[in-house]
Image (cartoon, rainbow, N blue to C red):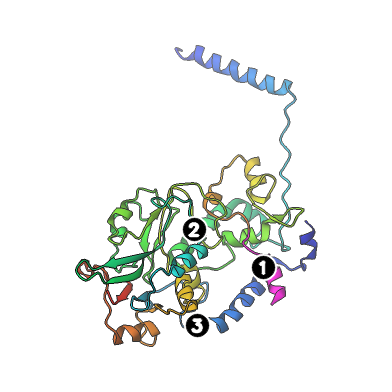
Amino acid sequence: MSERSEQPNLPRRTFLGIAASAAVAPGLMLFNIAGAKPDSQAVSSKNRWGMLVDTTKCADGCRACVEACHTENGISSRGRPTTDPQWIRAVTLRDRETGRETHLPLMCQHCEHPPCVDVCPTGASFRRADGIVLVDRHICIGCRYCMMACPYKARSFVHESLHDQLPHNPRGKGCVESCTFCVHRVDEGNLTPACVEACEKDGHRALVFGDLKDPNSELYKLLTEIDSRQLRQDLGLNTGVRYRGV
Amino acid sequence: MIHLPHLLRLGLLLAAGWLAALGAGCSAPAAPQLPKGLGDECVEPLDVIRRAHMHLLSDQRDKTMHEGIRTQEHSLKSCIECHASKDAEGHWVPVDAPGQFCESCHSYTAVSMDCFQCHAAKPEKQPLLMRVEKR
C-alpha cells in the first residue's frame, strides 16, 4: 500500500492523457509509422497485412521466431508436444527424390477466404477488415471445426487451465487460438511482429511483414521483385503469408 | 382448492426459515471495502460505472477485438492498471483475489465473473504513472 502514497495525485482523466501521449511519442521514433492509426479509429480494408517468408534465408535448426512468438504471447509448453499450443511451427520439407531440405516457419496464413471462418458455427473465427484472421474467444465454444478446416494446421486448442496470461493476450482453456500477426503491436503502429523482430535480430532477415496493399511497403516491393508463392495456392484462399523458395 | 395444502405447507416452511434466520441473529453483510484506485476519479461517474461497467466493458471488448479500437477509457486493462494493488512485498495482487477491487463487490452481490479465466488480473509491469515518470 505504500506504493499508493508515492503516486502523484492526478485525476484519472489527466493520467490517461499523459499515459497515452507518453506511449505514442517514443513509438513514433522506434517504429515505422506507416501503419499507425489513432487508437479510436477502426481498422480498414485500405490495409492488408501480410508477410513474406524467404526460405532461402531460413536457417536449419533455428527456432528464434518460434521462441519469440511464444514469449511475446505468453505461450508455455507443458512438455506435451501433441497438445501444447503452437502458434508458429518450424517445419522442414524434404524432397524424396533429391533429399533437398527446405526450412520454413508455418503459422496462420491469414487467408482472404479463410476456411476456418467458413466453418465456424458461432462467428468466433473472423477476418478483420485489414486481413488479420482472429478467434474471438468470447464467442468461441471450442468445437475445433476450424482446426479441422485449416489446411495449414495453424490452430491450437487450449486443453488445460492457464495462469499468468499476459495483459495484451488474454487466452484460456477451451478456446482455439492461432497467430494474430501480433495484432496488439500492429494496432499501435508497430509493424514488427515478434517473429520478424527475432529473425532480424539473429541476422537472417527471412521474414518481412508489411502491407500487401501499400505499393511503398518493403513487402510489396519484394513481392513484385522476387518469385514467391502461396502454400497450397491451388485452394484459392489468397493467403496473406507468401513463401520464397518452396 | 386442490393446491391449498401445498401452499400452506410452503408458507409454513418459509415462515419457519425466516424465524430461524431471525433467531440466529442474521444481519445484513457489511458493505465491501474497496481498495482505492490510482487516480482521483473514475472514467465515469460512480453511479454509471457501478451499474453499467459490464456493458461498457463488453462494448469495448467487441470494438477492440473486431475493429482494432484500442482506446483506454473503457478497457479492462486500464481498469486493472488503476485498480490493482500491491501486497506488503510490493508484488501485484490480482483484482479477483479475496478483498481486492473486483472480487469484494462481486462476492457481496453474489455475481460470478469469468473475465479472469483468460484475462490477466494484474498489470504486467509497473503502474503506468511510474512508467510515465521514468520517461
Q: Image check: A95 left or right of A153?
A: left
Say which residue appears at 64% left-offset and 61% top-offset.
B81
For the C terminus of chain A, the image quarter is bottom left
State how far apart marks 3 and 1 are (Cα).
23 Å
Q: Image check: A195 left or right of A152?
A: right
**Residue that label 1 marks:** B128
Kindly state the secondary structure of the residue where label 1 is placed: helix
Q: Chain of mark 2?
A: A
- Does label 2 lie on the same chain as label 3? yes
Say which residue appears at 59% left-offset and 61% top-offset.
B77
Instruction: Residue A20 in the image: state x and y as whole percent.
Output: 61, 73
Instruction: Residue A210 in the image: state x and y as whole percent.
Output: 40, 79
Q: Residues within 10 Å of mark 1 (few under 14, many from 20)?
A: many
Task: Give whichever of discs 3 and 2 has the lower sequence position.
Answer: 3
In this view, A140 is above or below A210: above
In this view, A44 is above or below B114: below
**Residue that label 3 marks:** A33
Residue B127 lies in the magenta stretch: yes
**Residue that label 2 marks:** A75
Q: Which residues are magenta?
A: B123-135
Tell me the quarter of the picture where residue A103 sits.
bottom left
Say which residue appears at 44% left-offset and 69% top-offset.
A65
| Residue type highlighted by circle 3 | Ile
Say which residue appears at 33% left-offset and 78% top-offset.
A56
Q: Nearer the viewer, mark 1 or mark 2?
A: 2
Q: Chain of mark 3?
A: A
